Amino acid sequence: MSGFSYLIRALAGRDRLTDNDRALIETLPHRRRSFPKGAQLVVEHSRPTESCLVTGGITAREVFLSDGSRQISAMHVPGDFVDLHAFLLKLMDHSVVALTECEAVFVPHGELLRISEQSPHLTRLFWLSTVIDGAIQRAWIASMGRRSPLSHISHLLCEMYLRLQVAGLVEGDTFDFPISQPDLADMLGLSIVHVSRTLKELRQLNYFTWDGGRVRMLDYKRLAKLADFDPTYLNLIQEPR
């Protein structure tokens, strides 16, 4: 797939794209980069002049405290801009790290400015992507604050199943999710021991399998019920914007 195919797929799932919309995206000047697992795509306190679009692998926003502890506050999959907000904020208040081997393209902010002037429709759709980021953040905060560990992990798996489905990265009921238990612990705000115990309990319920970094949903509806999962916040609706 081309560098922008996942982005086009994600936007087209939420609104109709014109041929001009697609052409504007596909002809955006950009540079490509590959990142090993653990590398930073975007550095905290930097002043980016480009925005980073994930085209392969899974990345995460991370915040470090002064004692060295880390909180992962978001995950991003192919088709996601990880720092579109930096176009306006200018200074990054967090970093973005590769949770797996990753591919990304970097689009100059000047080109995003050009699109904002040439295509109000695409401007609204890019705005929508940042609004959805905010909705996901609210769902994560609610999970961390109020869900049990069992429900929290279930909710995360339901979310990633749908987000990777949008990107075309789910085969039947199976998707790649090679996330380590330490990374999961930093997402959930739990100890690694607690994460391991909760995953074992979930596996025994036989809602999914998770082997070798590959998840197979055995009963998505039951897992969603356990998680009290409502996908409204992902805005998986195609309608005029």
Image (cartoon, rainbow, N blue to C red):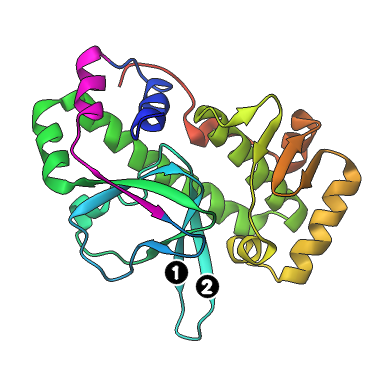
Residue type marked 1: Val
Circle 1 crowding by C-alpha within 10 Å: few under 14, some 14–19, many from 20:
some
Residue type marked 2: Arg
Please check the rendered image and state whether residue 61 is part of the magenta-colored stretch, yes or no.
no
Left or right for 8, reference 106: right
User: In the rendering, at what x and y percent does residue 113 appear?
Assistant: 12, 40
- In this rendering, the answer to whether 9 lies above or below 143 is above
Quadrant in which residue 173 is drawn: top right
The magenta segment is 18-34
Q: Residue at x 58, y 52 (%)?
A: 142
**Residue receiving disc 2:** 70
**Residue receiving disc 1:** 63
Q: Residue at x 55, y 35 (%)?
A: 164
Left or right for 218, reference 4: right
- In this rendering, the answer to whether 85 lies above or below 96 is above
Which quadrant of the figure contains the N terminus? top left
Left or right for 171, reference 118: right
Badge 2 marks a residue whose secondary structure is: strand
Question: Disc 2 to disc 1, how far (Cα)?
Answer: 6 Å
- 2 or 1: tag closer to the N-terminus: 1
User: In the rendering, at what x and y percent does residue 78 appear?
Assistant: 45, 39
Quadrant in which residue 154 is drawn: top right
Query: Seen from this angle, which residue lies furthest bottom?
Result: 67
Closest to the observer, 88 or 226: 88
Circle 2 crowding by C-alpha within 10 Å: few under 14, some 14–19, many from 20:
some
Quadrant in which residue 7 is drawn: top left
Please check the rendered image and state whether residue 32 is part of the magenta-colored stretch, yes or no.
yes
Badge 1 marks a residue whose secondary structure is: strand
User: In the rendering, at what x and y percent does residue 179 appear?
Assistant: 63, 55
User: Mark 1 and mark 2 in contact (Cβ < 8 Å)?
Assistant: yes
> Which disc is residue 172 wearing?
none
User: In the rendering, at what x and y percent does residue 178 appear?
Assistant: 64, 51
